[in-house]
């Protein structure tokens, strides 16, 4: 009997048994009411599901054990080398041979597959990645890391992983390519720019911004971010642009992207990124947006902050004109921007900001701005203190206590954080 | 006529049971789906930290922890909170006019001095007497609020909200043990959502039986006594199946008062915690949802499957009884106060699905179970039981309940929700309580629920008594 017919024989036998017992069970409960039949079916289904889950648990446990075994093996052989490469001792550029020596690899093995299979490569790159992100080594030499990964054929492995169907593997591989800034073939990332999975598509976009020398970056010409944008997108974009700038590549015109978006959240994101990347030269392109989108409160706030941080003094008149007509939070953002301009022309506006509101938060911030507005502002501040109404005296206490005063100074703030405008309550 | 009533009741109970099992199955499928989604979107802790730690965009969080007469543990607890790993957070300890040395210890240990304050009472709380901050840079994250006695945690939390200056706040108990990476895990949900996140719930487990060192759970273990063991299984089921399942359709009904993250602005606009409520956490969340829906704003509620917080639960049947009676009263109160949300699609999936589910399957179930139990006794006494069918039906319910608990263990293992010290022993213990639960624990809970309902209906005064804590094991 051949193998195939033997298999067929056993299959038919098992099926015959199953059919027999299934019919037996049906006949056994034939005279019972429907609800009992349902109960029996549910019971059998529960037992089958529990058996399946037990099997899945065993498989999963086996997989984890196998991973741990390979992990031990890889770490025993290369663990010390990994640590060395991230230490201060490896901060100077090393040759491929030197790196191989660190890992105890004989010269004749260079250029060959040092790691036996993909599983070992997966473990190796995972371990190195975890060390890299956990230690955040300031000494790590990027060139050495790239050479090391090439020595172990990791870029090739990651390129293959990106092409796999598993979404989690794709995402994992792209993240590693980005973190290590590996110069993989452009097609690897580019073909994912049209992925049906939003998550993969975005990661591919961010990787492309970071790795591509192309300056077009035309994905933002569409309304892609109008539908979906979150804080993570902004962090990813900032990270990619920062890496791009460090690599000496030209940054895109973010004001243009801000103008192309319809969604307020996406517009705000690009305006914030402008001040993060000092795009003073494009600030004038926000003027139109400022004039036409007055109803978008958050956007007006972000534009005001960006102009303030970047010292776009041409916008001062626009901000002064808008100050009293805006909602309270926007008023605060505008007053901060005027303070940062420090042209000496806005003291009256700050005073108006103080007097024309009943909101204590706005009054406090107006005082804070005056306090930080050079000598002229400080003089006005003391004048107001001397004549302050009993109700307002508590504000001035904040400026006398060293603990709270520390948060009042505007020069200590990070240029990117909007929460600097909330000192008052704590 | 009695025969007709008998048949109607029997079929009603059978239909109810089938529907309940179907709803559980649905939650199982949804939680599994959510886990699949998270496996792609939620990387490991180190990656999240790498991503958020260095970014100025990482949202700031205020941790609010009310304290009343905690002189024995307050310093350990504040030290433990200080060790939370997150780049941008403040700790607000609200002293609810403790009559012991709580305040004195805090002032001396952290070199606190009074700072100017002008608290705009954004939400209702008893007056704040003073706000204190440390003169030392290393304690700059700490804010201590000294207020008049409110008597309820909700009042203390509201005082904390009034002082809070960050976009998000986490409400916790001062004696909870928080995982160092908890805030990262929760904030990852916030930064990763395309819709404004108004609340994130985190998985919370019992610290009974765990080993604690330096304010951290270093060895997670299933408790050794039966009452906390049952609760551990119940908590796992609640967080990993129920809440995760509901969160996948944005219909999370509750963010635990023990450890939950909220959007400060939305919480304030919804009125904060209600100190008269017995279920202030559910109550506030439902008001937040109502506010968002009534103002036409989109929102997202999330659940973090990994354990973020450990709390000491009732260790005896007596304290469990007190806690569950209170919870049952709270549930009745929620149903009564928020009835307009029930079966109301205007309030989204929470109004259309979760609250009806809670009403039908959580609120009514104990009443129906008690009735069924009494009915069964009557049938036994009158010889009206068909034992073959009864055993088969009971077998179905029993096996389904075992299946649910089994799924939780499978889920926990595959998602690595808890890093047990000894996975095999922990799972064996949990499997044991799975088999015993329908006979021991479930009847107790059913009884407590009915007592709670009765006390609510009969308008008996609710007296809140804290759980008698035995303390956690410390590593030698």
Image: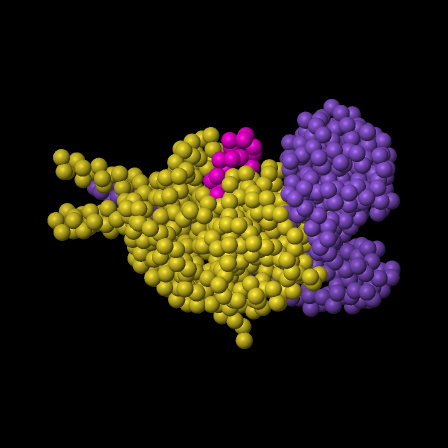
Q: Which of B455 and B244 lies nearest the eye of the viewer?
A: B455
Q: Which of B399 and B465 lies nearest the eye of the viewer?
A: B465
Q: Residue at x 14, y 38 (%)?
A: B2
Q: Colour of chain A?
A: purple
Q: Position of residue A244 (x, y in %)?
A: 81, 44
Q: Position of residue B322 (x, y in %)?
A: 35, 57
Which quadrant of the structure image shows residue A221? top right
Q: Is residue B227 left or right of residue B411?
A: left
Q: Residue at x 77, y 60 (%)?
A: A137
Q: Residue at x 51, y 48 (%)?
A: B125
Whether A353 is among the magenta residues is: no
Magenta stretch, residue numbers? B284-299
Which quadrant of the structure image shows residue A121? bottom right
Q: Is residue A397 visible?
A: yes
Q: Is residue A263 above or below residue B103?
A: above
Q: Position of residue A31 (x, y in %)?
A: 21, 41
Q: Position of residue A72 (x, y in %)?
A: 65, 66
Q: Is residue A116 visible?
A: no
Q: Which of A28 and B260 lies nearest the eye of the viewer?
A: B260
Q: Is residue A354 left or right of residue A374?
A: left
Q: Is residue B324 above or below residue B298?
A: below
Q: Which of B71 and B58 lies nearest the eye of the viewer?
A: B71
Q: Is residue B244 left or right of residue A38?
A: right
Q: What chain is the yellow one? A: B
Whether B291 is among the magenta residues is: yes
Magenta: main secondary structure equals helix
Q: Is residue A359 left or right of residue A33?
A: right
């Amino acid at each position: 009997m051949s193998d195939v017919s033997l298999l067929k024989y056993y299959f038919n036998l098992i099926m015959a048994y199953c059919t027999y017992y299934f019919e037996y069970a049906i006949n056994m409960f034939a005279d019972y009411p429907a609800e009992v039949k349902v109960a029996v079916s549910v019971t059998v289904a529960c037992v089958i599901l529990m058996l399946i889950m037990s099997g899945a648990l065993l498989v999963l446990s086996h997989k984890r054990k196998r991973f741990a075994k390979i992990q031990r093996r890889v770490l025993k052989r290369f663990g010390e080398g990994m640590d060395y490469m991230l230490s201060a001792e490896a901060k100077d550029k090393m040759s491929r041979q030197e790196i191989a020596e660190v890992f105890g690899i004989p010269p004749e093995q260079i250029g060959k597959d040092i790691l036996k299979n993909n599983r070992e490569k997966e473990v190796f790159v995972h371990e190195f990645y975890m060390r890299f992100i956990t230690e955040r080594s300031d000494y790590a030499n990027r060139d050495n890391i790239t050479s090391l990964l090439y020595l172990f054929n990791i870029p090739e492995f990651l390129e293959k992983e990106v092409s796999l169907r598993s979404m989690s593997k794709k995402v994992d591989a792209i993240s590693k390519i980005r973190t290590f800034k590996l110069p993989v073939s452009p097609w690897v990332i580019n073909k994912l720019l049209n992925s049906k999975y939003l998550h993969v598509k975005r990661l591919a976009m961010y990787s492309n911004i970071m790795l591509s020398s192309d300056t077009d970056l035309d994905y933002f010409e569409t309304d892609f971010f109008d539908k979906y944008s979150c804080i993570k997108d902004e962090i990813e974009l900032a990270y990619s642009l920062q890496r791009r700038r460090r690599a000496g590549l030209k940054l895109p015109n973010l004001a243009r992207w801000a103008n192309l978006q319809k969604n307020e959240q996406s517009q705000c994101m690009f305006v914030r990124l402008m001040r993060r990347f000092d795009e003073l030269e494009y600030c004038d392109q926000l003027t139109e947006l400022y004039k036409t989108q007055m109803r978008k409160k958050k956007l007006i706030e972000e534009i005001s902050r960006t102009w303030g941080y970047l010292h776009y003094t041409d916008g001062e008149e626009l901000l002064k004109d808008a100050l009293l007509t805006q909602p309270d939070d926007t008023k605060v953002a505008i007053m901060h921007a005027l303070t940062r301009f420090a042209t000496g022309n806005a003291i009256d506006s700050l005073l108006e900001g103080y007097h024309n509101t009943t909101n204590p938060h706005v009054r406090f911030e107006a005082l804070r701005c005056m306090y930080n507005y050079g000598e002229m502002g400080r003089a006005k501040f003391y004048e107001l203190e001397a004549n302050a109404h009993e109700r307002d005296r508590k504000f001035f206490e904040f400026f006398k206590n060293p603990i709270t005063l520390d948060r009042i100074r505007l020069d200590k703030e990070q240029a990117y954080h909007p929460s600097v405008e909330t000192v008052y309550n704590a | 006529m009695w025969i007709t009533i008998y048949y109607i009741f029997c079929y009603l109970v059978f239909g109810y049971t089938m529907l309940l099992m179907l709803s559980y199955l649905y939650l199982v499928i949804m939680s599994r789906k959510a886990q699949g989604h998270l496996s792609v979107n939620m990387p490991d802790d180190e990656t999240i930290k790498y991503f958020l730690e260095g970014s100025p965009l990482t949202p700031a969080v205020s941790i609010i922890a009310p304290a009343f007469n905690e002189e024995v543990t307050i310093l350990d607890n504040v030290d433990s909170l200080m060790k939370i790993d997150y780049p941008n957070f403040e700790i607000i300890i609200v002293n609810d006019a403790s009559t012991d040395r709580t305040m004195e210890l805090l002032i001396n240990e952290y070199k606190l001095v009074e700072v100017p304050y002008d608290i705009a009472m954004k939400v209702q709380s008893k007056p704040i007497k003073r706000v204190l901050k440390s003169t030392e840079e290393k304690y700059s994250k700490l804010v201590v609020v000294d207020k008049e006695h409110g008597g309820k945690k909700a009042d203390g939390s509201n005082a904390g909200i009034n002082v809070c200056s960050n976009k998000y706040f986490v409400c916790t108990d001062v004696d909870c043990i928080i995982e160092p990476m908890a805030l990262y895990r929760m904030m990852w949900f916030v930064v990763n959502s395309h819709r404004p996140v108004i609340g994130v719930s985190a998985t919370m487990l019992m610290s009974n039986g765990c080993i604690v060192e330096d304010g951290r759970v270093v060895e997670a273990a299933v408790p050794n006594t039966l009452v906390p063991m049952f609760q551990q299984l119940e908590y796992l089921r609640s967080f990993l199946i129920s809440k995760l399942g509901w969160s996948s359709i944005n219909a999370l009904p509750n963010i635990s008062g023990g450890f939950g993250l909220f959007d400060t602005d939305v919480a304030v606009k919804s009125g904060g915690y209600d100190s008269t409520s017995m279920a202030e956490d559910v109550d506030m969340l439902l008001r937040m949802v109502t506010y968002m829906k009534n103002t036409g704003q989109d929102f997202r509620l999330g659940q973090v499957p990994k354990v973020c917080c450990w709390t000491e639960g009732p260790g005896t049947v007596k304290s469990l009884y007190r806690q569950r009676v209170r919870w049952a009263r709270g549930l009745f109160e929620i149903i009564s106060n928020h009835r307009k949300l029930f079966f109301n699609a205007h309030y989204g999936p929470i109004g259309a699905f979760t609250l009806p589910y809670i009403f039908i399957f959580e609120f009514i179930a104990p009443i129906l179970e008690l009735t069924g139990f009494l009915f069964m006794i009557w049938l036994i006494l009158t010889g009206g039981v068909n034992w073959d069918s009864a055993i088969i039906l009971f077998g179905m319910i029993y096996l389904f309940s075992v299946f649910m608990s089994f799924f939780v263990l499978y889920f926990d293992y595959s998602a690595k929700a808890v890093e047990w010290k000894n996975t095999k022993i922990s799972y064996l213990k949990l499997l044991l309580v799975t088999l015993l639960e329908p006979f021991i624990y479930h009847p107790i809970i059913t009884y407590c629920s009915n007592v709670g309902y009765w006390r609510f209906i009969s308008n008996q005064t609710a007296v809140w008594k804290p759980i008698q804590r035995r303390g956690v094991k410390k590593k030698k």
